Image: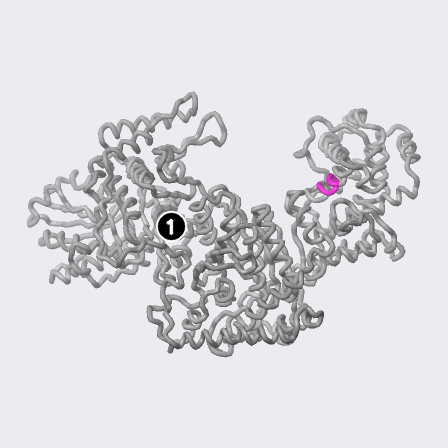
């Protein structure tokens, strides 16, 4: 059959499109004469194409060709089954295939043209015209009786009916606990093709016996069933409380596996023990919410009422993956249901949670800097279902929904890296979503597109959408254009399992299958848990203002615990006494925890950490400023490898790169370093010391400005690359440098998550241009700038943001230095106490570091200092563009030797410093504008009259160095020079701090700190 279809495609492409009937006639001589009558019969009897199947395809997939991925694969499956075993298909198919022995044109293959449904009749008509005297048609007709023809038609119609259930059975599924339906599939289109009458079956056909195709498992061990039983089993599998979307997946194996999990008779049945465990978990989830509602009635807690089955669902997933060897689950979720997850999934002590509610309860240590429903935690415990250890992590997150998704993925990826878990067998991620956010937030799409990229994949994530059918007050019909909230997942061929949350047993089956899918295929899977939100957006919100119809239905809803407990008691799975005892036992646990919380429970910061770093923090300071110099031996090892030209016979590289490497070698021979060498010295030395480095972003392997070239490409072989810095030593650490997808928000979040696992690493995100960080502003504001204050979580993530006005337009000129400075927590009116540890104290106290280095050596020391600090802070670097190749921007290798370290500010060392009383102007600046100022000063012969001080570390501000310079040049006018406008750049940040120093010095120049814009 596959051959017939491909030949038809071939004819359409070669003959019909060219309207050349002679060419068609010539092609026919290579075909077996029996092809014509069979194709005629297919058209005349309107079996699949011109009757029911064509009608169905045209109505539901108008934009797709007849031989699209689903229909062509379906017929090919039947044909393949017949090839393997003719007895495995119905007799009608056997006859059909036996009478069509043909050869495929040599140019046709899997990628051949597709036949549009509307064109097939045209093809058949041309075939009839090309058939001389119609003798072949009569000959073929004589080979099959009229009754057999009817069997062919009926079986083809049956197979189309089965396929319709597999593709669109979810349209009839009873997914909404409220019975509203319009909130689930907002298109609410009818699925006419799920009616047997659509395929010309009548009441009299219901008790006829049909042979089942191999593309369904509804028969179990039976190969033949009555139509009545077939319809019943299809409805049981696809149209009850589970709706399946999986036929968009371009893999026969995966589709067949899912079919088997849901179609096999009895596949969704739970054992008595599983039912009992589900009820027990449902008791805990429900009674926890009820206790919070009773004890703190006016508190916002974003409870999970209406979707209490979420807790048993998550536990089923964890149990299943744990049984397959997973021992770490990294989780992210929104605020709704978070406290219940902390209490009943991670088993965070209840007294610690209760302490967050009651303002009268005084913890022994400072409490959280964020609301309780944003907090994360980590706990290792025994998983009772599998009797194995499991580490459960809930990552802290802000109110910005879905922002945590890439953070979770990055953290999971780093856990896998450090454990050498190459296939995700030990570590997996699980992310919870809200329905409105899943459809509405672009970061969901960005994160999905990382799922299969080699440097970003976590080998499958289980996604659970808590589908409340509402977003705050907004009806789904006003908040999305896609039929389902989960349609975004189809772009990565993820199966989507919709399930009614008021059917706990169906939910357990779906969750078990989803976990098995992730274990087997290492791909993403989505569970759409269709439920409702019992309260408003929070517990003190009134939803009847905006959603009266829905909330009238919700008020009539019977609690799922009541319904399920009555069901199990009624079928004697559990006794009433057992149920009452479980309720009483958990209520007692809650009361006991509340009493403990009143008796001085210790609410330690570490109890809320989602990424604890054992043995990293040593004391509280003061700490010595780190020496970040490296030995001559290290410089030689890194320099030689970084400038080495690979053997042209083994690994030919681009001729221009050969010249680049020669220039590097020449500079190193003269003990000079440009920016690329300075960076390589930082990375190479850290790698040799055992520090893992990960550099990620758009085009980072080469570098936006073609300066880096850390990954060389074989000019003769596709995808063969060589990374010199990964070949420094047998004992070195791994260097991962990877071009990312064209995303800032998700990729920066991913790298942030990656940085949380191990502090002894250097994780870097580089923007193609500095302004590209705009696309990740939420990540910067909510995670980087405030993560430590809110969640006690440190991160050493580095952002490299190319910055400078080099004529590339307003967007690509500025990395918005002023925005990062505004986010810094430093007090502009307070000068730190003087002392040897001042610089380190400032670094320890601030929330993030902002630097604008101007020399390769200082950049090298800055990168190394980031790892050598005894704590972790985000580092924002205004990295250069013009300075990458600026002839004056070079450093001596001597500046990289031991005894050297990062210079927070370079003071004036020229003629002006020799006679400070005569200096008329002292100019403070930061970044590459220094080189422009220096050039102009020399041109105007002002070297002895103008002093220039360049600030390399803008935040925390080097008060002590600035104070010394202001004291030195007492008679000079004070200026700040920059390329940016007055309300941008570092001017306002620096001015206020310079004035604070002048105030401390009682200097009358306090109100005369001038702004100088430098324009080319």
Q: Residues within 10 Å of mark 1 (few under 14, many from 20)?
A: many
Horizontal relation, residue 951 to residue 641: left or right:
left
For residue 497, above or below residue 769? below
Image spot of residue 273 (x, y percent): 64, 63
SS of the residue under disc 1: loop
* Relative image position of residue 415 (x, y in whole percent): 44, 49
Q: Is residue 920 left or right of residue 523?
A: left
Q: Main secondary structure of the magenta part?
A: helix
Is residue 913 shown left or right of residue 783?
Answer: left
Give x and y (percent) for residue 397: 44, 60
Residue marked by disc 1: 758
- Image point (52%, 70%), residue name: 303
The scheme the figure's colours follow is: one colour
Rendered image quadrant of residue 729: top left
Tell which residue pokes out farthest to the front in this image: 387
Q: Residue at x 23, y 34 (%)?
A: 632
- Give residue 768's position: percent from left, percent from top: 40, 43
Q: Is residue 573 above or below residue 820?
A: below
The residue positioned 25% from the left and 49% from the top of the image is 978
What span is in magenta?
73-77
The residue lying furthest to the top in this view is 649
């Amino acid at each position: 059959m596959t051959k017939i279809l491909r030949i038809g495609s071939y004819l359409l492409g070669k003959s019909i499109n060219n309207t050349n009937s002679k060419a068609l006639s010539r092609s026919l001589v290579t075909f077996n004469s029996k092809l014509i009558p069979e194709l005629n019969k297919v058209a005349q009897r309107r079996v699949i194409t011109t009757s029911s199947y064509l009608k169905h395809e045209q109505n539901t997939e108008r934009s797709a060709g007849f031989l699209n991925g689903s229909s062509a694969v379906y017929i090919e499956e039947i044909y393949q089954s017949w090839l393997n075993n003719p007895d495995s298909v119905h007799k009608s198919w056997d006859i059909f295939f036996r009478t069509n022995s043909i050869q495929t044109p040599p140019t046709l293959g899997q990628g051949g043209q597709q036949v549009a449904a509307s064109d097939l009749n045209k093809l058949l008509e041309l075939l009839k015209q090309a058939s001389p005297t119609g003798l072949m048609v009569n000959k073929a007709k004589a080979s099959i009786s009229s009754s057999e023809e009817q069997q062919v038609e009926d079986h083809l119609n049956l197979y189309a009916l089965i396929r319709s259930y597999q593709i669109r059975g979810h349209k009839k599924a009873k997914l909404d606990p409220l019975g509203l339906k319009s909130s689930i599939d907002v298109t609410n289109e009818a699925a006419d093709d799920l009616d047997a009458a659509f395929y010309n079956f009548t009441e009299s056909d219901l008790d006829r016996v049909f042979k089942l195709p191999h593309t369904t498992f509804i028969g179990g061990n039976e190969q033949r069933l009555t139509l009545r039983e077939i319809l019943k089993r299809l409805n049981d599998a696809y149209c009850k409380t589970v709706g399946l979307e999986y036929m968009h997946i371009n893999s026969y194996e995966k589709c067949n596996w899912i079919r088997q999990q849901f179609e096999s008779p009895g596949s969704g049945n739970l054992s008595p023990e599983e039912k009992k465990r589900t009820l027990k978990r449902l008791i805990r989830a429900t009674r926890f919410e009820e206790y919070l509602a009773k004890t703190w009635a006016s508190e916002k807690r974003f409870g999970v009422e209406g979707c209490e089955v979420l807790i048993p669902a998550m536990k089923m997933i964890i149990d299943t993956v744990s049984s397959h060897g997973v021992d770490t689950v990294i989780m992210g979720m929104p605020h709704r249901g978070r406290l219940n997850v902390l209490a009943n999934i991670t088993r965070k002590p209840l007294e610690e949670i209760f302490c967050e509610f009651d303002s009268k309860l005084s913890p022994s240590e400072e409490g959280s800097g964020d609301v309780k429903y944003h907090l994360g935690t980590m706990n290792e415990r025994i998983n009772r279902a599998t009797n194995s250890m499991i580490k459960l992590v809930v990552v802290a997150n802000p109110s910005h929904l879905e922002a945590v998704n890439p953070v979770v993925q990055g953290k999971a990826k780093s856990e896998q890296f450090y454990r050498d878990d190459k296939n995700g067998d030990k570590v997996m991620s699980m992310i919870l979503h809200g329905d409105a956010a899943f459809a509405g937030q672009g970061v969901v799409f960005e994160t999905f597109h990382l799922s299969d990229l080699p440097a970003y994949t976590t080998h499958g994530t289980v996604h659970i959408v808590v589908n409340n059918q509402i977003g705050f007050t907004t009806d789904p019909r006003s908040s999305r254009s896609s039929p389902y909230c989960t349609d975004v997942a189809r772009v990565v061929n993820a199966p989507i399992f919709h399930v009614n949350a008021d059917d706990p047993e169906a939910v357990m089956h779906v969750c078990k299958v989803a976990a098995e899918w992730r274990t087997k295929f290492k791909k993403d899977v989505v569970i759409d848990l269709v439920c409702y939100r019992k309260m408003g957006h929070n517990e003190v919100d009134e939803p009847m203002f905006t959603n009266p119809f829905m909330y009238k239905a919700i008020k009539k809803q019977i609690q799922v615990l009541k319904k399920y407990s009555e069901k199990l008691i009624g079928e004697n799975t559990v006794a009433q006494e057992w149920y009452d005892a479980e309720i009483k036992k958990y209520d007692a646990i809650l009361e006991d925890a509340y009493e403990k919380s009143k008796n001085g429970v210790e609410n330690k910061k570490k109890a809320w950490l989602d990424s604890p770093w054992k043995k990293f923090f040593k004391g509280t300071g003061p700490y010595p400023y780190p020496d970040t110099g490296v030995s001559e031996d290290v410089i030689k090892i890194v320099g030689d490898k970084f400038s080495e030209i690979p053997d042209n016979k083994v690994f030919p590289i681009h001729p221009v790169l050969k010249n680049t490497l020669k220039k590097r070698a020449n500079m190193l021979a003269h003990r000079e370093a440009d920016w690329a060498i300075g960076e390589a010295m930082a990375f190479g030395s850290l790698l040799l010391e055992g520090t893992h480095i990960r550099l990620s972003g758009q085009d980072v392997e080469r570098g936006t400005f073609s300066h880096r070239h850390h990954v060389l490409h074989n000019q003769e072989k596709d995808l063969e690359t060589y990374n010199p810095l990964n070949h420094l030593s047998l004992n070195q650490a791994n260097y991962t440098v990877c071009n990312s997808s064209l995303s800032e928000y998700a990729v920066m979040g991913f790298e942030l998550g990656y940085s949380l696992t191990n502090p002894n690493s250097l994780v870097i995100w580089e923007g193609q241009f500095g302004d590209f960080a705009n696309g990740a502003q939420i990540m910067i504001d909510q995670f980087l700038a405030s993560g430590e204050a809110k969640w006690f979580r440190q991160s050493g993530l580095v952002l490299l943001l190319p910055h400078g006005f080099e004529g590339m337009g307003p967007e690509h000129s500025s990395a918005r230095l002023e925005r990062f400075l505004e986010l810094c927590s430093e007090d502009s009116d307070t000068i730190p106490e003087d002392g040897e540890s001042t610089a380190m104290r400032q670094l320890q106290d601030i929330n993030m570091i902002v630097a604008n280095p101007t020399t390769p050596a200082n950049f090298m020391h800055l990168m190394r200092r980031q790892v050598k600090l005894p704590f972790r802070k985000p580092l924002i670097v205004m990295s250069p563009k013009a300075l990458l190749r600026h002839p004056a921007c070079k450093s001596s290798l001597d500046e990289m030797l031991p005894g050297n370290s990062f210079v927070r500010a370079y003071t004036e060392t020229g003629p002006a410093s020799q006679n400070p009383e005569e200096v008329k102007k002292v100019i403070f600046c930061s970044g590459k504008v220094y080189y422009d100022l220096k050039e102009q000063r020399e041109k105007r012969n002002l070297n002895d009259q103008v002093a220039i001080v360049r600030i390399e570390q803008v935040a925390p501000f080097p008060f002590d160095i600035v104070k010394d310079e202001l004291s030195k040049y007492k008679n000079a006018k004070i200026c700040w020079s920059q390329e940016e406008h007055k309300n941008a750049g570092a001017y306002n940040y620096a001015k206020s701090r310079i004035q604070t120093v002048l105030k401390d010095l009682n200097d009358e120049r306090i109100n005369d700190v001038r702004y100088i814009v430098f324009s080319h």
